[in-house]
Image (spheres, rainbow, N blue to C red):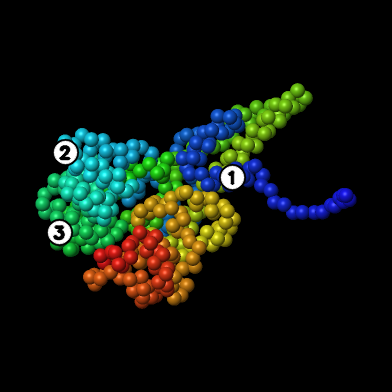
């Protein structure tokens, strides 16, 4: 056997440990990053961690005159559109405990347990609840349905947000006229975009002050009563960015950096290292090696944290400019965008954008959305680039078309495609069918309208 030795050149890209650490920290949520910093603090004497409120000293200017970057003093305060979900007692377990205490017929109690196990994460029951029961059990269903809607949390057992809100409204025992007016609001939530109640005041023939008062009562209700028991995630979901309009109509951007500790090099250990170096004692060689290693690690962590904060900040400004129509008018105005476009615009690698968007959320006036909501692989749907809409915006249009259909007959996917075409949106029947399924909307054969 003949053995030959050959020499050759080969290019190979390798990431340093510091680069790997930066990429890993980009992908961490604020909570996970906080834990990582605390863990590093315990083993690295050079790392000086301050747990006072971190102030992000922004050097970026507004993208336009209607965008501002502000400190958010109310970070962490959630309203009913901003749903914080955490690990705790499950909804089913909570409801089952209450059912156990009820003094009712055994058949009704069994039906209640069946309904409890069928509640979704929002606390809602499926519309075809009868299909859960055998023919001989159906007789217990009416009583069971009535009872489950009286259990805690108020609003469970409904089949829609509107029904849930009305169940909660009943529990407030308001004056009949107020209850009827708020019930009208619930049936016409679309008339109150951005909290503006002028249309409602006009429709109900009440003054603006009374409309605002009724709206404040409505906001105190919880459209998804079961979500606070959701155990699908093992940590709280706190938005990394908040992009909302203020009273003057300007977009304000804040981030979760306020809740993170600030990190820097410990001045005492810097001086200690300098003193050891100045001594020039050969016996200190091992000590100097140790100090150099941990100082470098601390500097790498500080760089990684600052890179993450700065990248999130830049991404927030980018979204505020690119998706201004969304922040003004809602999901149906979302324009198509891709992570590669963001990377090119911000002069960052696609991997950096991918990691900074991973498992992170943005709080807006229209709800809390994952970063992925703002990006898709599609170039958009429209007759021209100027009026292009994103995939998620088209899905909103499909929901809108189905919701506003008053013909008495459910629209087929082809009919929906035709209506989109009339709106200047090219979306094939198959694509409509795909998006309808993603929206969990039944086919025209099984839905009412």
Determine if residue 52 is in view. yes
Which disc, if any, is residue 206? 3
Separation of residues labelled 1 and 2 (CA atoms): 60 Å
Residue 168: x and y, percent? 20, 47
Separation of residues labelled 3 and 2 (CA atoms): 45 Å
Please give left or right for residue 171 compared with residue 246 in the image: left
Q: Residue at x 18, y 54 (%)?
A: 182
Determine if residue 220 is in view. no
Q: Nearer the viewer, mark 1 or mark 3?
A: 1
In the picture shown, does residue 423 fall above or below 441? below
426 and 288: which is toward the camera:
426
Separation of residues labelled 1 and 3 (CA atoms): 57 Å
Residue under circle 1? 22
Residue under circle 2? 104
Residue 263: x and y, percent? 54, 37
252 and 302: which is toward the camera:
302
Residue 51: x and y, percent? 47, 34
Residue 209: x and y, percent? 19, 54
In the picture shown, does residue 236 fall above or below 201? above
Question: Tag 2's secondary structure?
Answer: loop
Please give left or right for residue 445 compared with residue 67 in the image: left
């Amino acid at each position: 056997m003949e053995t030959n030795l050959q020499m050759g050149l080969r290019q190979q890209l390798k990431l340093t440990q510091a680069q790997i650490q930066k990429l890993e920290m980009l992908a961490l949520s604020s909570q996970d990053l906080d834990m990582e910093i605390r863990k590093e603090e315990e083993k690295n004497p050079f790392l000086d961690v301050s747990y006072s409120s971190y102030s992000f000293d922004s050097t970026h200017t507004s993208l336009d005159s209607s965008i501002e970057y502000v400190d958010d003093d109310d970070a962490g305060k959630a309203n009913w559109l901003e749903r914080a979900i955490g690990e705790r007692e499950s909804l089913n377990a909570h409801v089952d405990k209450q059912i156990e205490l009820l003094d009712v017929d055994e058949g009704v109690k069994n039906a209640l347990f069946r309904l409890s196990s069928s509640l979704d994460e929002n606390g809602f029951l499926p519309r075809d609840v009868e299909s859960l029961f055998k023919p001989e059990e159906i007789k217990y269903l009416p009583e069971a349905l009535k009872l489950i809607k009286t259990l805690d949390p108020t609003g469970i057992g409904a089949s829609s947000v509107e029904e849930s809100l009305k169940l909660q409204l009943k529990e407030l025992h308001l004056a009949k006229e107020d209850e009827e007016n708020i019930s009208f609001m619930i049936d016409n939530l679309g008339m109150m975009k951005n909290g503006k109640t002028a249309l409602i005041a006009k429709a109900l023939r009440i003054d603006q002050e009374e409309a605002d008062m009724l709206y404040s009562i409505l906001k105190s209700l919880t459209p998804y009563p079961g979500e606070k028991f959701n155990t699908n995630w093992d940590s709280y979901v706190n938005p990394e960015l908040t992009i909302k309009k203020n009273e003057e109509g300007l977009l304000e951007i804040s981030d979760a950096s306020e809740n993170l500790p600030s990190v820097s090099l410990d001045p005492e250990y810097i001086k200690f290292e300098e003193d050891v170096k100045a001594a020039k004692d050969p016996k200190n060689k091992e000590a100097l090696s140790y100090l150099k290693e941990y100082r470098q690690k601390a500097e790498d962590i500080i760089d990684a944290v600052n890179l993450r904060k700065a990248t999130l900040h830049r991404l927030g400004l980018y979204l505020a400019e690119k998706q201004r129509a969304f922040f003004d008018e809602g999901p149906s105005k979302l324009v198509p965008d891709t992570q590669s476009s963001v990377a090119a615009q911000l002069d960052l690698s696609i991997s950096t954008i991918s990691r900074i968007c991973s498992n992170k959320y943005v709080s807006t006036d229209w709800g809390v959305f994952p970063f992925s909501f703002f990006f898709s692989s599609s170039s958009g749907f429209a007759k021209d680039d100027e009026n292009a809409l994103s995939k998620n915006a088209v899905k909103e249009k499909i929901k809108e078309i189905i919701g506003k259909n008053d013909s008495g007959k459910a629209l087929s996917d082809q009919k929906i495609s035709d209506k989109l075409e009339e709106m200047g949106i090219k979306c094939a029947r198959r694509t409509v069918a795909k998006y309808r399924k993603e929206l969990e909307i039944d086919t025209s054969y099984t839905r009412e309208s």
